Amino acid sequence: MKQRYIRVGDQLSDDVAVVVRGGTLDRQLLREDALRNHAIYGTYGISVFAVRDLSLDELSQQSPLIRFEQLTIVTVGALRSAGLRLDATGRNPRHFDIGFDELEDGIGRLVSCEHQTVANPYHEA
């Protein structure tokens, strides 16, 4: 198992803070991503980017989000209300994983939490 770089003490404490994920909350894709994360790091996680220090518009123009036609936006409060956690991962200060302990339960909680899907005007085909 690979050791993940964790940014100790880095957290999104404001419930109105926003995270964005490339694509829609498609159960099959979420399952595949969570299983891939688990195979590498030993935990279930779904990659997201915090809208911090950049606007959503600016973040949408950057890799990897520019690759996606649609973006899913969710507040930290909605994730916490659904019983999900946000783990600060990687060296990018905007990168987090939505973490959960049980695969199907975690995916169900994520899909059913309040979110918005928008078109990415900067999508590169």
Image: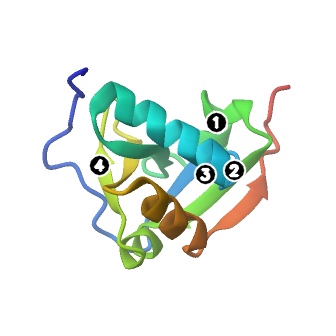
Label 2 residue SS: strand
Label 4 residue SS: strand
Which badge, 4 or 1, is on the more N-terminal residue?
A: 1
Which badge, 3 or 4, is on the more N-terminal residue?
A: 3
Q: Which mark is residue 71?
A: 2
Indicate the quadrant containing the N terminus: top left, top right, bottom left or bottom right. top left
Residue at (59, 65) in percent of width and height:
111
**Hey, which quadrant is residue 90 in on the image?**
top left
Viewer-side residue, 76 vs 107? 107
| Residue type, mark 3 in image | Leu
The 10 Å Cα crowd at callout 3, few under 14, some 14 to 19, many 20 or more, is some
Q: Which mark is residue 65?
A: 1
Foreground tag (3 vs 4): 4
What residue did someone put label 3 on? 56
Viewer-side residue, 117 vs 57? 117
Q: Are marks 2 and 3 in contact (CB under 8 Å)?
A: yes
Q: Are marks 2 and 4 in contact (CB under 8 Å)?
A: no
Which badge, 2 or 4, is on the more N-terminal residue?
A: 2
**Hey, which quadrant is residue 22 in on the image?**
top right
Foreground tag (2 vs 3): 2
Where 54 falls versus 35 (above or below)? below
- As measured in the structure, the alpha-carbon distance from the residue carrying label 4 to the one carrying label 1 is 19 Å
Task: State the residue lying farthest toward the bottom.
Answer: 81
x then y, percent, for residue 51: 49, 52
Q: Which mark is residue 87?
A: 4
| Residue type, mark 4 in image | Asp
Side of 38 relative to 27 (left or right): left
